[in-house]
Amino acid sequence: MTSVIRTFVLLVQAAFAAYNLYLARDSITKLGKYEETGRKLAKYSNSVQNQMNKTRDTQASGTMSVCVTISSPIASSLAPGTRHQQNTFTYHDVRY
């Protein structure tokens, strides 16, 4: 029963990460539309160039984090030997 719950939790985690990856792709696509305008403005202002670089860095690091997040539950569920076994202890009467 616990393996079913564990698998369900891993699938939910993977689905959530996949949705975040979709959102990251959408954000990067929208940023690409404004890239040319940003370049024109960056010729006149260093702060625009700095902001563009920060935005690119933030999107790239967020995308990499989501990729790691999505690969972790998938690898965990497919890896051999990851099934949890219930520990059973046997107590014996010890007489001296």
Image (cartoon, helix red, strand yellow):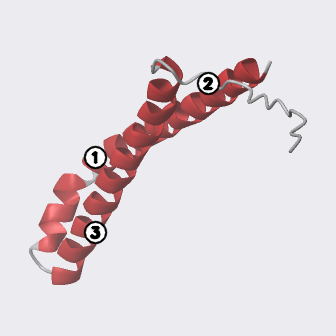
Residue at 78% across, 28% down: 88
Residue 26 place in picture, x, y as percent: 41, 39
Q: Which amino acid type is shown beneath numbered disc 2? A: Leu
Q: Is residue 27 left or right of residue 38?
A: right
Mark 1 residue element: helix
Query: The N terminus is located in which quarter?
Result: top right
Q: Name the residue beneath numbered marker 3.
A: 54
Check the image and name the residue furthest to the front: 96
Q: Is residue 92 toward the left or the right of residue 31 in the image?
A: right
Amino acid type indicated by mark 3: Lys
Q: Quadrant of residue 57?
A: bottom left
The residue to which callout 2 is attached is 11
For marks 1 and 2, the one nearer the N-term is 2
Q: Residue at x 86, y 32 (%)?
A: 92
Q: Earlier in the sequence, mark 3 or mark 1?
A: 1
Q: Nearer the viewer, residue 95 or 17?
A: 95
Q: Nearer the viewer, residue 71 or 36?
A: 71
Category of crowding for the residue at label 1, using alpha-carbon neighbours closer than 10 angstroms: few (below 14), some (14–19), many (at least 20): few
Q: Position of residue 60 (x, y in %)?
A: 29, 52
x and y percentages locating residue 13 in the rendered image: 60, 34
Looking at the image, is mark 1 or mark 2 nearer the viewer?
Answer: 2
Mark 3 → mark 2, Cα distance in angstroms? 33 Å
Q: Are marks 3 and 1 in contact (CB under 8 Å)?
A: no
* N-term mark: 3 or 2: 2
Q: Which mark is residue 33?
A: 1
Label 1 vs label 2: CA separation? 34 Å
Disc on res. 7 = none
- Mark 1 and 2 residues: CB-CB less than 8 Å, in contact? no
Q: Residue at x 21, y 59 (%)?
A: 37
Label 3 sits on a secondary structure element that is helix
